[in-house]
Structures are given as structure tokens and as C-alpha cells.
Image (tube, rainbow, N blue to C red):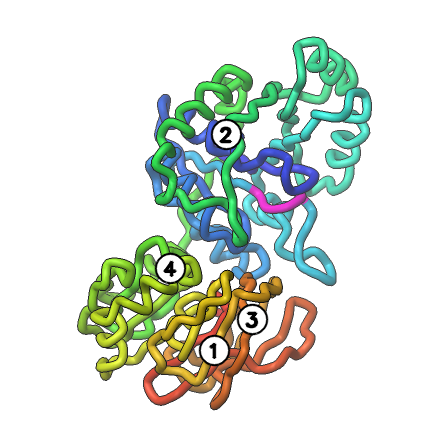
């Protein structure tokens, strides 16, 4: 049993239904999860729901053989799509959830938010089913159904199109969010209750047995791995620095690198290592606390290791970080960089990167998603950059002595 959960558009309920399915099925058999695209937050909810690691499968940033190798395994897999089923990067929609369906030859379950429709549901379902014969839509899940009568109307309109169930409206399953997505799983003290409630609802509303019969083997497949940038790597990991990709860490371990984790929020010093890696996250929400954590900051300032910061980690390596309230906080001061959240502006999109220096030389696929404004960035840029359409963008990031970083999140080798 392996399939993809998708929808016509964002906001249709994919995440809630996926989490409920994962928890409900994990009560019966082991189940794995994956997330389409560059998402750090949803996968941690998936892991909590099913008790198995969740990987990202990115059809824009990863080669097909890489995706097949990551997805392979004896345990059934449920993949949560991103945005609408056929929505990808410009100009041609590459990276859409539909690309994963084609690459992995998996059936798609289409979630339709039916809250404000009746007979029109058939036009949506039939349009998606007919749109691409190489994307097999196995059936529909109706979401936000108002009443048994409403469900009857919807099922009648769909005719012989398979319906795996109808999920009633449940306001108490709405998840809190902030500027980069949902509140992180590790910040939810009610997480287990939420997941159990979602599983109870989904387990009752959907035909779990019928979904479990969607058997698609995912045979073993060996794909390329990333070589570790160093043989010992110290990685910041807490609520402020949580945005790491499991496939990258797994590749580094498989390449023989020793990984050690530490918490800047707890004022831990960075362990001795060849490379100190500060991933992205939410340092802007903890800027005052981080500025006061001199043990952590001095461990960076006094280190002779190479240091790399990604997005939030990059901001931490700068001189100052101004929070959303306009308060300016001193950071590590290792790069001539000042950033601010006082006037937020969205930066979003896939990136093709090329570096000739720093810990990640060569060509990389990456993603940018942040609201920070750069007030000052002086010195030597780290990457040359193109967007998803191949348009040359201004150089990104900085490198100074043993310290480097940028706002881009590296995903894979180009």
C-alpha cells in the first residue's frame, strides 16, 4: 500500500487528513511518510504521527533515480503532496506532486474541499482525472462535508468515481501557524492528543481497508549519495534551528561523517568538529535569548573550524538581527551582515547555486523561503544564482575566512 495524497489547491486539508491516516494506519501496520517538495515542518508532524522518519521527495531539485532510491522500502509509504496536484515551478510546472506520481508510478487520492459545493464536485473530479493519463487518480476524499445529506448529494454527483470517504467539518483540528507555516511539531504540547483526535476522525470517516488495498511495491534502488563536507560535523538543533533535511544527514552518516548535535538556545557550546553547521529555523523569535547566550556565541567566535549558516543560521553569523518589534540584537559578528524582520518581505522560490569556495563547492539545487530583509551584506559572495526559469539573480551569501552562509537551503547536487 503506497499512494499520494493530493488536492486541487492548497488549503484543502491534505496535512490534517494525511496525519490522521498515518496515525490510524500505524495502529494496524507499520507505515512510512514522505512530503513532496521543500518543506521542513510537515515532515516532523508525519514522523510523530507514524513513528517513522519522514523524507522529502522533491521532483524539481532531485533526479528521478534519487527520488526512487529515497522512496524505496518494504514498509508502505504515504506521500503528502504540496499545493495543487499539477502546481510546480515556472515556467512548466516542474516539481509538482504529479511529477512524483509519474516517477514512482503511484496512485493519487484527490482531496476535494466540498464545503461550498454540491454538484460542481463532479466537474472538478472529472477534470483532474482526465487532465493527464499518466497520473492515475484512484479516487476522491471529500473534506469539510456539512451533513449526511450534503455527503449524499456529493456522492450522487460523482457517480461511479470511487469515494474513499467523507470527512466532516471539525474546527478543533485546525492547526496554528506562523510566517513559515505550521507551528513546529516540537512546540505543540498537545501534539499526541491532536494526532489521536485526527486518527479517530479519519479512521471513522474513511474506508481504511479500501485505502490499504492500494498496493504498489517500491523496490530497492541504489541512488547517488552526497559526500559529507567534513568528517566531523557539529549541527545546531533546537526550536530555533530545526530546518535540516534527513536525506542530507543520512548521506553524511553513510559517508562516514560523525554528527554531533547541540542547542544554541540552551547556550551549548558548539562541539569540536571540522565543520559547524547552523541550519535554518526561527532565530528571529529567540534573538534576545540567543544574543545573551555568550557560551554559544563565543564558541563560534573562537573556533578554528569551518562554519556554515543556512537562512536562520546565516543571520546568526551576521553582526545584528532586528526582530519583528524593531529591537536589534548582536549576533556572532562573523560575517559583515545585518538582517531585519521589522519590515518583512517574502523571498520564495527554487534556486540553482554554484560555488567555487566554501564547504559546498560545485552546483546545487536549493530553495529560498524567508521574510528577512538584508540591511547590509558586504564582502565576497558565496554563490552565483539562477531561479527556476534560469534567470540570473544577484549573487547570494557571503564568505569570510572560515565562515560562510546564505539564505538558500541546499537540497541536492545539481
Horizontal side of 105 relative to 378 (left or right) equals right
Between marks 2 and 3 in the image, the one whose residue lies nearer the viewer? 3
Taking the spot 33% from the left edge, 60% from the top edge, the residue there is 249
Q: What element carries label 4?
A: helix
- The location of residue 407, given as percent across then percent down, is 50, 70
Q: Kindly report the secondary structure that dominates the magenta region of the rendered protein.
A: loop
Q: Which of marks 2 and 3 is nearer the N terminus?
A: 2
Picture quadrant of residue 269: bottom left
Other residues around mark 4 within 10 Å, as few (<14) / some (14–19) / many (≥20): few
Q: Earlier in the sequence, mark 3 or mark 4?
A: 4
Taking the spot 32% from the left edge, 69% from the top edge, the residue there is 291
| Residue range corresponding to the magenta coloring | 81-85
- The location of residue 41, given as percent across then percent down, is 46, 48
Cα distance in 3D space between marks 4 and 2: 45 Å
Give the residue number, with chain letter if any, for mark 3: 373
Horizontal side of 264 relative to 338 (left or right) equals left
- The location of residue 263, given as percent across then percent down, is 26, 59
Cα distance in 3D space between marks 2 and 3: 47 Å
Taking the spot 66% from the left edge, 21% from the top edge, the residue there is 162
Q: What element carries label 2?
A: loop
Give the residue number, with chain letter if any, for mark 1: 338
Q: Residue 326 carries which label?
A: none
Q: Earlier in the sequence, mark 2 or mark 1?
A: 2
Cα distance in 3D space between marks 3 and 1: 9 Å
Residue 261 can be seen in this image: no
Q: Residue 286 carries which label?
A: 4
Cα distance in 3D space between marks 2 and 1: 52 Å
> Toward the viewer: 377 or 161?
377
Other residues around mark 2 within 10 Å, as few (<14) / some (14–19) / many (≥20): few
Amino acid at each position: 500500500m503506497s499512494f499520494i495524497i493530493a488536492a486541487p489547491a492548497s488549503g484543502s486539508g491534505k496535512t490534517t487528513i494525511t496525519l490522521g491516516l498515518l496515525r490510524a494506519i500505524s495502529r494496524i501496520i507499520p507505515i512510512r511518510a514522505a512530503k513532496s517538495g521543500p518543506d521542513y515542518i510537515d515532515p516532523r508532524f508525519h514522523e510523530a504521527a507514524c513513528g517513522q522518519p519522514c523524507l522529502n521527495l522533491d521532483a524539481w531539485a532531485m533526479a528521478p533515480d534519487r527520488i526512487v532510491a529515497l522512496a524505496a522500502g518494504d514498509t508502505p509509504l504515504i506521500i503528502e503532496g504540496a499545493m495543487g496536484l499539477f502546481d510546480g515551478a515556472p515556467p512548466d510546472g516542474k516539481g509538482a506532486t504529479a511529477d512524483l506520481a509519474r516517477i514512482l508510478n503511484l496512485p493519487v487520492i484527490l482531496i476535494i474541499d466540498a464545503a461550498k459545493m454540491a454538484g460542481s464536485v463532479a466537474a472538478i473530479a472529472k477534470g483532474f482525472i482526465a487532465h493527464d493519463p499518466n497520473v492515475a487518480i484512484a479516487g476522491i476524499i471529500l473534506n469539510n462535508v456539512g451533513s449526511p445529506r450534503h455527503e449524499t448529494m456529493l456522492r450522487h454527483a460523482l457517480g461511479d468515481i470511487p469515494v474513499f470517504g467523507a470527512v466532516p467539518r471539525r474546527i478543533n483540528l485546525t492547526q496554528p501557524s506562523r510566517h513559515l507555516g505550521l507551528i513546529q511539531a516540537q512546540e505543540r504540547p498537545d501534539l499526541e492528543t491532536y494526532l489521536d483526535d485526527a486518527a479517530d476522525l479519519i479512521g471513522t470517516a474513511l474506508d481504511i481497508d479500501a485505502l490499504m488495498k492500494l498496493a504498489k511495491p517500491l523496490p530497492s534502488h541504489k541512488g547517488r549519495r552526497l559526500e559529507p563536507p567534513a568528517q566531523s560535523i557539529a549541527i545546531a538543533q533546537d526550536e530555533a534551528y530545526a530546518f535540516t533535511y534527513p536525506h542530507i544527514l543520512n548521506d553524511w552518516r553513510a559517508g562516514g561523517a560523525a554528527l554531533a548535535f547541540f542547542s544554541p538556545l540552551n547556550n551549548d557550546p558548539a562541539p569540536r568538529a571540522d565543520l559547524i553547521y547552523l541550519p535554518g529555523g526561527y532565530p528571529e523569535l529567540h534573538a534576545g535569548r540567543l544574543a545573551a547566550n555568550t557560551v554559544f556565541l563565543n564558541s563560534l567566535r573562537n573556533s578554528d573550524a569551518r562554519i556554515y549558516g543556512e537562512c536562520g543560521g546565516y543571520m546568526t553569523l551576521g553582526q545584528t538581527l532586528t526582530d519583528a518589534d524593531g529591537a536589534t540584537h548582536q549576533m556572532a559578528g562573523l560575517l559583515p551582515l545585518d538582517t531585519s524582520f521589522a519590515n518583512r518581505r517574502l523571498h520564495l522560490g527554487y534556486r540553482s547555486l554554484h560555488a567555487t569556495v566554501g564547504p559546498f563547492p560545485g552546483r546545487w539545487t536549493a530553495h529560498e523561503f524567508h521574510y528577512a530583509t538584508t540591511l547590509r551584506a558586504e564582502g565576497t559572495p558565496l554563490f552565483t544564482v539562477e531561479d527556476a526559469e534560469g534567470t540570473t539573480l544577484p549573487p547570494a551569501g557571503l564568505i569570510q575566512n572560515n565562515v560562510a552562509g546564505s539564505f538558500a537551503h541546499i537540497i541536492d547536487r545539481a
